[in-house]
Image (spheres, grey):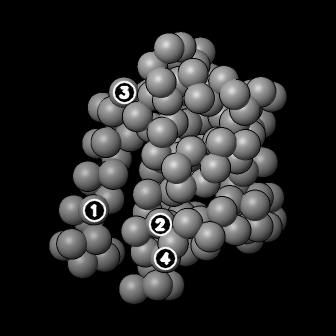
Amino acid sequence: MGTTAEVDLRSQVEHEAITAKIGDVAAYLQEHLGQKMTAYLSGIDHAKTVGLWVAHKSEPRDLPSMRLRYAYRAARLLIDAYDDETARAWFFGSNTRLDDEAPAYLLRHGTSPDDLRRMIPAAYAFVEVAG
Protein backbone atom coordinates (compact mmCIF):
# COMPACT_ATOMS: atom_id res chain seq x y z
CA MET A 1 0.00 0.00 0.00
CA GLY A 2 1.21 3.52 -0.68
CA THR A 3 1.68 6.45 1.62
CA THR A 4 -1.28 8.49 2.81
CA ALA A 5 -0.44 11.15 0.19
CA GLU A 6 -0.42 8.51 -2.58
CA VAL A 7 -3.75 7.09 -1.44
CA ASP A 8 -5.22 10.61 -1.26
CA LEU A 9 -3.98 11.37 -4.80
CA ARG A 10 -5.47 8.13 -6.12
CA SER A 11 -8.81 8.90 -4.48
CA GLN A 12 -8.77 12.46 -5.81
CA VAL A 13 -7.95 11.33 -9.35
CA GLU A 14 -10.65 8.66 -9.25
CA HIS A 15 -13.19 11.21 -8.01
CA GLU A 16 -12.22 13.70 -10.73
CA ALA A 17 -12.43 11.03 -13.42
CA ILE A 18 -15.98 10.25 -12.36
CA THR A 19 -17.33 13.72 -11.63
CA ALA A 20 -15.61 15.99 -14.15
CA LYS A 21 -17.46 17.05 -17.28
CA ILE A 22 -16.35 14.85 -20.13
CA GLY A 23 -15.22 17.90 -22.11
CA ASP A 24 -12.85 18.78 -19.25
CA VAL A 25 -11.52 15.22 -19.16
CA ALA A 26 -10.91 15.40 -22.92
CA ALA A 27 -9.26 18.82 -22.51
CA TYR A 28 -6.78 17.47 -19.96
CA LEU A 29 -5.89 14.53 -22.19
CA GLN A 30 -5.60 16.74 -25.26
CA GLU A 31 -3.34 19.19 -23.43
CA HIS A 32 -1.00 16.55 -22.06
CA LEU A 33 -1.15 13.73 -24.61
CA GLY A 34 -2.21 15.53 -27.79
CA GLN A 35 -5.40 15.61 -29.81
CA LYS A 36 -4.58 12.65 -32.04
CA MET A 37 -3.62 10.45 -29.11
CA THR A 38 -6.77 11.44 -27.21
CA ALA A 39 -8.85 10.48 -30.24
CA TYR A 40 -7.03 7.16 -30.53
CA LEU A 41 -7.51 6.34 -26.84
CA SER A 42 -11.22 7.13 -27.04
CA GLY A 43 -11.64 4.86 -30.07
CA ILE A 44 -12.64 7.50 -32.60
CA ASP A 45 -11.07 8.09 -35.99
CA HIS A 46 -11.38 11.87 -36.34
CA ALA A 47 -9.15 13.90 -34.03
CA LYS A 48 -11.12 17.10 -34.67
CA THR A 49 -14.02 15.55 -32.78
CA VAL A 50 -11.92 15.84 -29.62
CA GLY A 51 -11.86 19.61 -30.16
CA LEU A 52 -15.67 19.64 -30.22
CA TRP A 53 -15.75 17.78 -26.90
CA VAL A 54 -13.21 20.17 -25.38
CA ALA A 55 -15.28 23.17 -26.54
CA HIS A 56 -18.40 21.54 -25.05
CA LYS A 57 -20.06 21.65 -28.48
CA SER A 58 -20.54 17.90 -28.56
CA GLU A 59 -20.22 14.94 -26.19
CA PRO A 60 -18.84 11.50 -26.89
CA ARG A 61 -21.09 8.47 -26.82
CA ASP A 62 -20.97 6.20 -23.79
CA LEU A 63 -18.12 3.93 -24.89
CA PRO A 64 -15.66 6.69 -25.90
CA SER A 65 -16.62 8.56 -22.74
CA MET A 66 -15.81 5.53 -20.59
CA ARG A 67 -12.48 5.13 -22.38
CA LEU A 68 -11.64 8.80 -21.78
CA ARG A 69 -12.35 8.52 -18.07
CA TYR A 70 -10.08 5.48 -17.69
CA ALA A 71 -7.39 7.18 -19.78
CA TYR A 72 -7.67 10.25 -17.55
CA ARG A 73 -7.10 8.21 -14.40
CA ALA A 74 -3.96 6.61 -15.77
CA ALA A 75 -2.66 9.80 -17.40
CA ARG A 76 -3.08 11.90 -14.24
CA LEU A 77 -1.17 9.37 -12.16
CA LEU A 78 1.64 9.08 -14.71
CA ILE A 79 1.94 12.80 -15.43
CA ASP A 80 1.94 13.70 -11.74
CA ALA A 81 4.68 11.11 -11.06
CA TYR A 82 6.72 11.70 -14.25
CA ASP A 83 5.78 13.97 -17.16
CA ASP A 84 3.76 14.13 -20.39
CA GLU A 85 6.40 12.35 -22.46
CA THR A 86 6.64 9.42 -20.07
CA ALA A 87 2.84 9.13 -19.98
CA ARG A 88 2.66 9.02 -23.79
CA ALA A 89 5.38 6.36 -23.87
CA TRP A 90 3.61 4.30 -21.20
CA PHE A 91 0.34 4.27 -23.13
CA PHE A 92 2.01 2.94 -26.27
CA GLY A 93 4.60 0.65 -24.71
CA SER A 94 4.19 -3.08 -24.28
CA ASN A 95 3.14 -3.80 -20.69
CA THR A 96 3.84 -7.12 -18.99
CA ARG A 97 1.01 -6.50 -16.50
CA LEU A 98 -1.38 -6.35 -19.47
CA ASP A 99 -0.26 -9.54 -21.22
CA ASP A 100 2.29 -7.51 -23.21
CA GLU A 101 -0.40 -5.33 -24.76
CA ALA A 102 -0.04 -1.56 -24.89
CA PRO A 103 -2.49 0.28 -22.62
CA ALA A 104 -3.53 2.45 -25.58
CA TYR A 105 -4.53 -0.65 -27.53
CA LEU A 106 -6.60 -1.95 -24.63
CA LEU A 107 -8.35 1.40 -24.29
CA ARG A 108 -9.12 1.73 -27.98
CA HIS A 109 -10.44 -1.81 -28.31
CA GLY A 110 -12.00 -2.34 -24.90
CA THR A 111 -15.78 -2.46 -24.86
CA SER A 112 -16.62 -2.89 -21.18
CA PRO A 113 -15.38 -1.69 -17.79
CA ASP A 114 -13.90 -5.17 -17.25
CA ASP A 115 -11.76 -4.70 -20.38
CA LEU A 116 -10.53 -1.29 -19.24
CA ARG A 117 -10.13 -1.53 -15.49
CA ARG A 118 -7.06 -3.79 -15.79
CA MET A 119 -5.13 -0.77 -16.99
CA ILE A 120 -5.42 1.18 -13.72
CA PRO A 121 -3.44 -1.27 -11.52
CA ALA A 122 -0.78 -1.35 -14.26
CA ALA A 123 -0.52 2.46 -14.06
CA TYR A 124 -0.33 2.31 -10.24
CA ALA A 125 2.45 -0.28 -10.46
CA PHE A 126 4.43 1.87 -12.87
CA VAL A 127 4.01 4.96 -10.69
CA GLU A 128 5.11 3.05 -7.56
CA VAL A 129 8.51 2.57 -9.22
CA ALA A 130 8.85 6.38 -9.21
CA GLY A 131 8.15 6.59 -5.47
Residue at the disc numbered 4: 82
Residue 68 on image: x %, y %: 55, 36
Q: Nearer the viewer, residue 89 or 108?
A: 89
Which residue carries the number 1 mark?
9
Q: Secondary structure at mark 1?
A: helix
Q: Of residues 86 and 115, which is closer to you in this image?
A: 86
Q: Are marks 2 and 4 in contact (CB under 8 Å)?
A: yes
Residue 82 % position (x, y) = 49, 76
Residue 26, given in percent of the width and then of the height, sits at 51, 36
Amino acid identity at mark 4: Tyr
Measure the C-alpha gap from mark 3 to mark 2: 20 Å
Residue wearing tag 3: 21
- Left or right, residue 95 beside residue 80: right
Q: Earlier in the sequence, mark 1 or mark 2?
A: 1
Of 35 and 78, the residue lying toward us? 35
Q: Quadrant of residue 36?
A: top right
Local packing at callout 3 (Cα closer than 10 Å; few below 14, some 14-19, many 20+) is some
Q: Which mark is residue 48?
A: none
Which residue is pictured at 50% across the width and 84% down the height?
A: 129
Give the Cα distance between marks 3 and 4: 25 Å
Residue position for label 2: 79
First reached walking from the N terminus: tag 1 or tag 4: 1
Drawn side of residue 38 relative to residue 121, left or right: right
Residues at marks 1 and 4 touching, judged by CB atoms closer than 8 Å? no
Q: Name the amino acid type tagged 2.
A: Ile
Q: Secondary structure at mark 2?
A: helix
Locate residue 57 relative to residue 94 in the image: left or right: left
Name the amino acid, label 3.
Answer: Lys
In primary-sequence order, the first of circles 3 and 1 is 1
